[in-house]
Image (cartoon, helix red, strand yellow):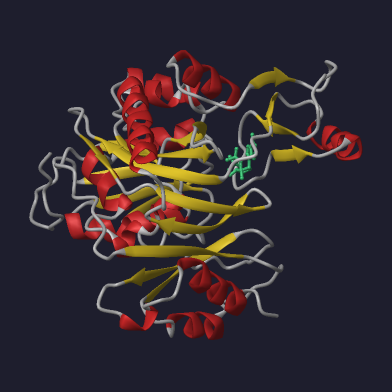
Amino acid sequence: MKFTEATASSPAKFKRVGVVGGGQLASMMGDAARALGIELVVQTPDAADPAVSVAAGAVLAAVDDVLATAHLADGCDVITFENEFVDLDGLRILEQQGVLFRPSLSSLSPLLDKYVQRCYLQGLGLPTPKFWAWDCSQDLHLDFPFVVKVRRHGYDGQGTFIVKDRESFESICDRVKGQSLLVEEFVPFDRELAVIAARSATGEMAIYPIVETQQQNQVCRVVIAPADISLEVQTEACAIARTLLNSLEAVGVFGIELFLTADNKLLVNEIAPRTHNSGHFTINACKTSQFEQHLRAVCQLPLGNCDLKCSSAVMVNLLGYESAESDYLAKRKQLAQISGAFVHWYGKKVSRPGRKLGHVTVLFDAGLGENEGKSASAIAQTIESIWYAT
Ligand code: ADP
């Protein structure tokens, strides 16, 4: 297919985009919006949230506050999401009144509950881990380890529990009692992969190079682009993305997390109906960032080119490791000294353990000879040893 090179010259059909959510994902959409001549208005609870300072306006309210979304929609051509923890039934009333959501609410509805999402994938004939709905009241006859997940509002591993033995099972039950849950088989995967894919309102599709993601305690630490996988696996991952986005009639960027097993089988773990952490490398490493791509899809501009501008890249999340109010300027300066490094800081005022505060992307082979011979893992280790040093 032919791509349009990302330039500021293409006139966007929609000029003012409302974004439900105002965290780092909305904030990183800010630069792309400026380049495309689009204004962003965000709906987010706190004036200190990362996207407020880059947006043309903000409605300060919770993301599931439907009246606030109605207010947001008043001044915007289209509403999109950086956060899926919304009140879908409430938003349907706005959609009936003519508010344009991209992706549409019918694209979101099979995805917001992890059990419903799994059933949807199964219905499409896509491979997933074996799963069951559960609510702590029924007996479970599963061998350890297995996985328990809260069906809604889980993120960054909050709400995902690997159950290793009876003792951990009991303490997890105490934590999740009363919630609707998903139980699934533990997949002893070889690697985790992610596909970032975009679909336009006319069904045009653009897929970024498949990446490897590395998690610790269920939280993403490192993303390597492109993943070192066979052509067959790449082709299958792209086919999964196409089936899914076409079936959902998706508009915008979606993130698809996959498990790759030792015998080269792919299983779909999760779909995020928005830009995704595993796509942050695209800002510096690709011809079109995932944030620009999302706005292009939502505003009816032709999709941009997903190709890498370098031979490979590694992205490392800067996760909070203490409760503090610091801007970690000295560490950020040190990270910026790494050859080929781009340091992104989300401007959050408060750090907490596990909170995503920023990320670093390092490009290889973009005329930056100092990284020659170094592996992505070695660079990731260097970044983490600087960042987590106390
Ligand atoms: P969240 O929505 O909070 O990101 P995920 O379902 O994506 O939660 O799980 C987070 C991480 O937990 C995954 O990236 C993976 O490392 C691990 N995980 C989740 N489900 C399984 C599973 N069935 N088997 C093995 N590991 C899993």
Q: Which residue lies at the image location 68% right of the left edge and 52% below the top edge?
A: 217
Choose between 363 and 271: the one closer to the eye.
Answer: 363
Residue 191, how many percent across, how many down? 54, 46
Choose between 294 and 221: the one closer to the eye.
Answer: 221
Asked if residue 365 is positioned above or below residue 249 in the image, the reply reads below
Choose between 225 and 299: the one closer to the eye.
Answer: 225
Q: Quadrant of the C terminus?
A: bottom right
Asked if residue 73 is positioned above or below residue 230 in the image, the reply reads above
Q: Which residue lies at the image location 33% right of the left edge and 54% below the top edge?
A: 29
- Indicate the quadrant where residue 206 lies: top left
Q: Quadrant of the N terminus?
A: top left
Q: Is residue 317 left or right of residue 108?
A: right
Ligand 1 found in image quarter: top right
Q: Which residue lies at the image location 41% right of the left edge and 52% below the top edge?
A: 227
Q: Which residue lies at the image location 33% right of the left edge and 42% below the top edge?
A: 231
Asked if residue 239 is positioned above or below residue 225 in the image, the reply reads above
- Indicate the quadrant where residue 246 lies: top left
Q: Note whether residue 387 is visible.
A: yes
Residue 205, how many percent across, how many down? 23, 35
Q: Is residue 362 left or right of residue 198?
A: right
Residue 111, how many percent across, how many down? 49, 27
Residue 373, how many percent across, how many down? 40, 76
Tally of numbered discs? 0
Q: Note whether residue 82 is visible.
A: no
